[in-house]
Image (cartoon, helix red, strand yellow):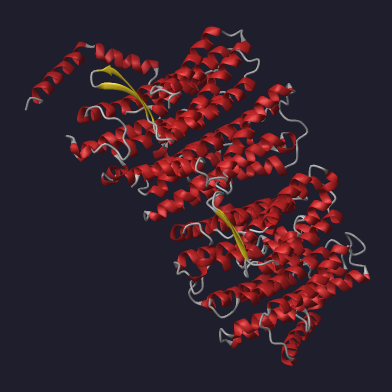
Amino acid sequence: MNGVLGITLLLPLIGILALLSPRLRRPALILSPLPLIVCAVAEAEIAVFPRSLLGSSFAIDELNRPLLLLAGIGWCVSGWCAGALVHHRRGSFSLLWLLTLAGQVTALLSADLATFYLGYVLMTVASYGLVVHERTAAAYHAGRVYMALALFGEALILTGLLSLGFQYGNLHFAGFASQPQPGAASVLLVVGFAVKLGIVPLHFWLPLAHPVAPAPASAVLSGVLVKAGLLGMMRFVPAHSLGPIELWLGLGLFSAAYGVVLGLLQSRLKTTLAYSTISQMGLAFMGFAAVQAGAAAPAALGLFVLHHGLNKISLFLAAGHRGSHRAGQLWFLLSAAALAGLPLTSGMLAKTALKSALGKVDADAWLLGLSLSSALTTTLLLHAFNLARAQTKGRDTPHPAWVVSSLAGLLVPWAWLSWHQVSVKLSVVTVLDALWPALLGAVVYGALKRPLAHSPHKVPDGDILFVVERAAARAWSMRRYFPRRFRMLRPPHLERLLTAERIKGVELAFSRTSVLGLLLLSLLLGLWLSKF
Amino acid sequence: MTLLGQATPLYMALISFAAGVLLFVLGERRQRARIVVNLVAAALNLILVVLAIQAVRGGAEFLWRMPLLPRLDLVLRLDALSLLFSTLSATLWLVTTIYAIGYLERSPQRARFFGFFSLCVASTMGITTAGNLFTFYVFYEMLTLATWPLVVHRGTPDSLAGGRAYLCYTLFGSALFLAGLVWLHALTGPQDFIARGVVLSDFPGDPTAHRIIFLLMLAGLGVKAALVPLHGWLPRAMVAPAPVSALLHAVAVVKAGAFGIVRLVYDVYGSEYVHALGMADVLAAWAATTIIYGSLLALRQDNLKKRLAYSTVSQVSYIALGTALAGPIGTVGGLVHLVHQGLLKITLFFCAGNYAEMLGVKKIVDLDGVGRHMPWTSSAFTLGALGMIGLPPMAGFISKWYLGVGALTVGQPWVVAVLIASTLLNAAYFLPLLQRMWFAKEPEAFPQAKQMALSTRLALVGPPVVTALLALLAGVLAGFELSPLGWVKGLVAERYE
């Protein structure tokens, strides 16, 4: 294997060692993710370590390439920004940051079941620390909800992975996609990974957890981490194993619409952006369903993921800044325009690719749905811009990292396109196709602006969470109907049976002549009977 | 081979036994001599085990036989399975001895403690190397008696009650086991352990008798292995000092029961015959019930050591569960957990002891913010807890993977459901502890924060860190031949052709 893979995997761990010296903290955060970018453009390769874990292997292939690029840029700019935006508990923040990064890198590069699971788990558990970084009551609550849902997902994923491991062993999984596989395992895996993506109704951790974290952490959580779920689906769920594609497309579209509507009802920037992530991941999930049904190439989905991740990072970094700065407003608008898919932005590219993928599913309704979702995204992002302008806390001048991420969101997808020849036909029609939803969205926002401004924050954070929590509380209160211990399984109190008094009593009983006589008689009887 | 005679397994037990006697003779005062005897004996034992591993890998066999009564031999033998357990015991004995020296600094009755401690290890060594059921039983009983003074070491009414519960349960179990042993002996005559089991159908006695004997012995072993509802003694015995709890839960008593079940199933009855009798399903169902029940009760505890004790109840049954699965993969999962659970659980108990000793923290609610105060101990605890949940790359994940895949291979998917439920329950009772340690606000003052000498600190903090790293390495380097997994794979191949 060439050294790039090894360096990429080890650098976060070396970064953790470097934390011992506070002066190296900032460089560690910025430099640790950089080799990922090199990986993204390196030759495809596989490295196998048969002796570690259950036999680990790592690979660079067409599936993880866009994510590697996204993670490299995203973690780097966010880490750079974190140096300026995080002021308390920097040591523990950096440690958890690098642990999460180490998990992310492992998950992205791994090419076998156990190693992927290792990376995924490490990423999930360590990012808990980023969520509760502020140590407020809201942060703890969000962390608890996040962990509970993540564990639920993890349990489903592990079940699915065990059944894959039973069928194919823990080997390099390039072969899975072509293998037939029982539908049950596929569904378990998809639902398990959907937790990370925030597909409705498993989304409610996202609007709680992403906003409470410091801005750079929210950026990587929303921009990069959620995509690991998508990679998991692409890796482990082979084509045509999920049954009717319409079900999954519908679920994705519903998430896309749901995220926007709920997002519009929020009055805090980060919460709105988190709902926007739910909405966009709904679209990505539709893309996955299309790939699943064999209608689209994974490359189209890769482009979409890259585009969303970079722009979402830029928007979340904006949330760490004050809203009054002119240049800052410009950068925010640029990223928002790209995310909404305005003509000639990276968003137009990504959505065109997604549409051409869905076009093959032969349903105009889905295409219309996609266009309408673009309109809704425009509305939501205008709302977000309004909120961003009103931000009064944070850094004043735009941090260079933010500028870099904004530019990356605009330019990198184009570069990616020219390098990878994703089949995107660009024409006047495409541009018009991108234009009308945006205009429609702007009009809708114009109509909604006033009512929205007058009724702030009607929906509680995590919308359906309170239903779940109430149900959980009720279930918990039911426990008084259960016995403290299951009587049947109560450990016998042997030592109480053998108290001195009782032994004395037995002793006394034996010492009575009548008892002895009886015993002797039965013994004789037994001996006599045994003769026959 | 030339260096080690046939009596090597005997020496392994004798070293600890001699150390125990010597410690009694030395008396309370000679602290330095006591430390030297302790460490030298533990180190010697470990060296002997390592040499034996090399010899056995080279194809050597060790068998020592002494006629005790007509047709009743004391047989000590080293095979791959006994080496698995004796390596674990020898390693953890050394570590625990160091820990105990630090833990019991300046407390009374140390001669008595370390004397019985050594006897306890001598019996464990005997159990691991026993070559037939009778020898196993002799050492099994010796273990019961040698452990009791350790459980009641503090002499408080609480610990006396705990010790009483312990004796009542284990003696009851021994009686059942003895009944089964005698009955089996009457049917088959003397039989050594043999891979894949004695062919019972060649001997008088119908399958019903075989079933009853199996259940008698299983119940007898189940007391020590803490199968529900025979587990009552275990949570009460946690009144013992931390090093004792650590050894009790990780190596000595509980593991002796689990190891006995493994021997009974594979080397007496033979896995196939156990299945033919339908007893494997009984064992699997029993183990599964224990796994879930133990975890549920662990959730309810507010005392750290009690929570760990119930967690042991649950985790040790993984071994029984793996034993009950027919295929080789499930067996690997069960056997390798014998080692993995030992490493993980001893780490957790060491850490619990450290919290109690250094900060006076015994309740879970008092754990807030201890991470910042005791980073090394808390890191070790974190690794141990994550391993217990079964998250990679810790050793616990390897066990769970093999158990799950093994269950699917033999067409028993319900076992996967049990494993997943257990994973979630483990997470539910371990993760809140980690959250308190690392992310909760530090209190103004801990209940009883103590200042300690550096050497004491090292003796207390070093062992958990070492065992946590071992558990980490057992997972990360599982592919190597000498890892627990590699070793178990080899010995399982012997039992399934």
Q: How many marks?
A: 0
Q: Using the rendered view, name the quadrant where residue B26 is placed.
A: top right
Q: Is residue B459 visible?
A: yes
Q: Position of A90 compared to B212: left or right?
A: right
Q: Using the rendered view, name the quadrant where residue A150 is placed.
A: bottom right
* Residue B37 position within the rendered picture, expressed as x and y whole percent measured from the top left: 56, 15
Q: Position of B355 compared to B291: left or right?
A: right
* Residue A136 position within the rendered picture, expressed as x and y whole percent measured from the top left: 76, 50
Q: Position of A244 compared to B276: left or right?
A: right
Looking at the picture, tell me which residue is in the foreground, B164 or A338: A338
Q: Position of A89 compared to A532: left or right?
A: right
Looking at the picture, tell me which residue is in the foreground, A246 or A137: A246
Taking the spot 33% from the left edge, 38% from the top edge, the residue there is B195
Looking at the picture, tell me which residue is in the foreground, B1 or B22: B1
Residue that protrudes farthest toward the front in the picture: B2
The N terminus of chain B lies in quadrant: top left
Is residue B77 placed above or below A354 in the rendered structure?
above
Looking at the picture, tell me which residue is in the foreground, B133 or A218: B133
Taking the spot 58% from the left edge, 55% from the top edge, the residue there is A115
Q: Using the rendered view, name the quadrant where residue A276 is placed.
A: bottom right
* Residue A481 position within the rendered picture, expressed as x and y whole percent measured from the top left: 49, 46
Is residue A50 placed above or below A293 in the rendered structure?
above
* Residue A69 position within the rendered picture, expressed as x and y whole percent measured from the top left: 72, 66
Q: Is residue B357 visible?
A: no
Residue that protrudes farthest toward the bottom in the picture: A428
